[in-house]
Amino acid sequence: MSTYKSSDAFNGAKLHQWFDNTLVYILLVLVAVITVFPFLWVFFTSFKGVNDPIFSVPPQLLPSSPTVDNYLRVFTQLPMLSFYFNSLVVTLTVVVVNTLFGALAAYPLAKMKFRGRDAIFYTLLATYVVPPVLTSIPSFVLAVNVFHFYDKLASVIFPYLSGVLTIFLLRQAFAAIPDDLINAARIDGANELQIWWSILLPTIRPSLATVAIITFVDQWNNFFWPSLMLHTRANMTLQVGLVALQGAFANDARGIAAGVVMTVVPMIIFFALLQKQFIAGLTGAVKG
């Protein structure tokens, strides 16, 4: 009798777990559909011809006669290759240098013992809550009057060569590494720079990928500061150039959709290449 009760309880627990898992998957699918649908709408709109309606009842998602004329029109009327090149130069430079500087700053804050270490770290964290808009005026004055970077790509690179979020994430990654590994390297005669470069950086590779993705997305989408500093078409980044796109294609929703797709695709590709490292690194940083 007790065997039947145990079996019924076991089957009931499995059924309850299956129901919970199914409910979670349904919710995740709904969230995914809601999140992806706007991009799919823009993506398919970018391939619609003049005979395909943008807004209709019922709505038409797939174009009846797909065409790439919208993309060709955007490339013809705007210097999109120049916008792409400028965005890649700015974004990749900031990603590499910000990750390097962040790792250099995070290592002593995580593994070296010196007076005021925690005070320095928490002071850096406190600056993260200050909105960038509040510092835009003094930053603009410095960039224009002191460094003479107005309307140059350097003006949108130098302010982002180091970031508090990067230091925080990499400090958490370094803190999770056992001290015995570092002490063993010191006993073998390695100096601090050798330990940082040859031992610690390969160990926290997922966290480095996390920082790289976050920085890439942030810089690729950066608009406010580049819009203040870049005013020549030849020097504009892609996000600033999209404003020109909206002006040139004010009544052309298909052309604007093509420009938006060209802006989003590089981020999707970059994330797809590093998604495993991103998830592993973010999980490690949170645990640390």
Image (cartoon, helix red, strand yellow):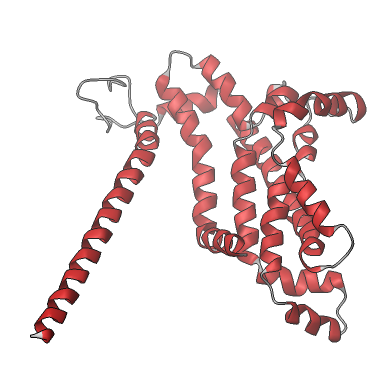
Q: Position of residue 202 (x, y in %)?
A: 68, 71
Q: Is residue 217 visible?
A: yes
Pick out the residue farthest to the left.
Answer: 1
- Above or below, 145 against 92 in this view is above
Q: Residue at x 36, y 29 (%)?
A: 45
- Above or below, 196 against 80 in this view is below
Q: Residue at x 75, y 41 (%)?
A: 127
Q: Nearer the viewer, residue 76 or 50?
A: 50
Q: Nearer the viewer, residue 223 or 241?
A: 223
Q: Position of residue 143 (x, y in %)?
A: 84, 28
- Above or below, 69 against 5 in this view is above
Q: Nearer the viewer, residue 270 or 173?
A: 173
Q: Residue at x 54, y 62 (%)?
A: 283
Instruction: Classify residue 117 as left or right of residue 11.
Output: right
Instruction: Classify residue 17 as left or right of residue 37.
Output: left
Residue 244 figure quarter: top right
Residue 116 figure quarter: bottom right
Instruction: Classify residue 13 as left or right of residue 115.
Output: left
Q: Residue at x 59, y 51 (%)?
A: 213
Q: Position of residue 25 (x, y in %)?
A: 29, 55
Indicate the quadrant containing the N terminus: top left, top right, bottom left or bottom right. Answer: bottom left
Q: Position of residue 29 (x, y in %)?
A: 30, 49
Q: Nearer the viewer, residue 123 or 243?
A: 123
Indicate the quadrant containing the C terminus: top left, top right, bottom left or bottom right. Answer: bottom right
